[in-house]
Image (cartoon, rainbow, N blue to C red):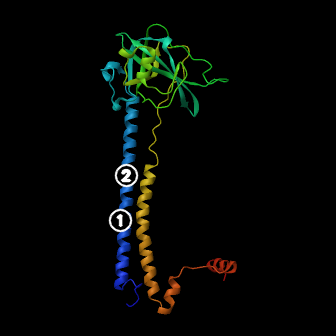
Amino acid sequence: MSDPENPNHPTGVRRWGAYLVLVVVFAIACGLLSWWQWDRRAETLAQGTLVTRNYESDPVALETLLPGLGSWRALDEWRPVEMHGHYLRDRQLLVRNRVFNDNPGFEVLVPFRLDDGRVFVVDRGWLPIGSTQDTPDRVPAAPAGDVAIVARLQQTEPVLPGRSAPKGQIPEINVATVAKLSGTAATTYTGAYGLLASETPPPADRPAAVQEPVIDEGPHLSYAIQWIAFAILAFFGLVWAYRREKRINALPVEQRAAARAPRTRNSDTDAEDEILDKAGIL
């Protein structure tokens, strides 16, 4: 009992009690981090379910989801809307730096004037950069005359400071900017734009259509399990250290210091002997 390193010595009891408190605190922190990862996973799955349901829903009239020009609800993202009117073909814009299947290119924006006079910005799809220049080799023209279209709602993008683009191009899909450039600011929907799904009558050619978003829950489940494993390992480590200390204290007093000292290898021969000894050769 005179050895303060002994777990049964009052000093040892206090020290091992402090170790236990630290392990418990660490385990609680791991549990909270694991819970956070479970919560993130649940949010991701819920968002994926919403996207899938919206993407597969039946089209509704545009004014049903966007009653005002500035209307937008995040719950309506990817929902298809239908409308009738004609494209303002001479006010087409290209959106720079848009990636599709890991390839750089542009998206084609064309204002669409509805029968009631309001304007809705339509993203007709993606085009690759040109073979010899930065701009696309060819931009398929939007259909002329009256057209019925179905588009999937997307929220307008914010203006990013410091970004610019040549004439006829824009750096992001900010609908208010598109409306200003096209001269239709007073009548354009500014809360959302639409990713083109279909046009009737269908054109002979059009930019590549945006694909259905891939739902990926990410690594949250594996991270949650890892944090629980860390908490369990901390308790195993404490138990192992406590039992080791108990075994050391069962040795004669003169052997305890050597038993607690970290093991060192004096030479390559000692290392080889250790390997052979573990293999049962020595």
How packed is label 2: few (under 14 Cα within 10 Å), some, or many (20 or more)? some
Side of 30 relative to 92 (left or right):
left
Spot occupied by residue 19 in the image (x, y as percentages of width and height)? 38, 73
Residue at mark 1: 25
* Residue at horizontal 38 percent and vertical 91 percent from the top: 2
Tag nearer the camera, 2 or 1? 1
Residue positioned most to the front: 162
Residue at mark 2: 36
**Residue 79, picture quadrant:** top left
Tell me the kind of residue under disc 2: Trp
How packed is label 1: few (under 14 Cα within 10 Å), some, or many (20 or more)? few
Return the mark for residue 213: none
Side of 168 relative to 241 (left or right):
right
**Residue 155, picture quadrant:** top left
Name above or below for residue 80 compared with residue 216.
above
Q: Name the residue nearer the viewer: 190 or 212.
A: 190
Q: Is residue 252 visible?
A: no
* Residue at horizontal 48 percent and vertical 27 percent from the top: 172
Under circle 1, the secondary element is: helix
Residue positioned most to the right: 269
Side of 266 relative to 175 (left or right):
right
Tell me the kind of residue under disc 1: Val
Contact (Cβ within 8 Å) of mark 2 with mark 1: no
Spot occupied by residue 89 in the image (x, y as percentages of width and height)? 49, 12
* Residue at horizontal 43 percent and vertical 22 percent from the top: 177
* Residue at horizontal 49 percent and vertical 8 percent from the top: 144
Q: Is residue 207 visible?
A: yes
Check the picture and name the quadrant holding the C terminus.
bottom right
Real-space Cα distance between discs 2 and 1?
Answer: 17 Å
Check the picture and name the quadrant holding the N terminus.
bottom left
Spot occupied by residue 273 in the image (x, y as percentages of width and height)? 66, 80
Badge 2 or badge 1: first in the primary sequence: 1
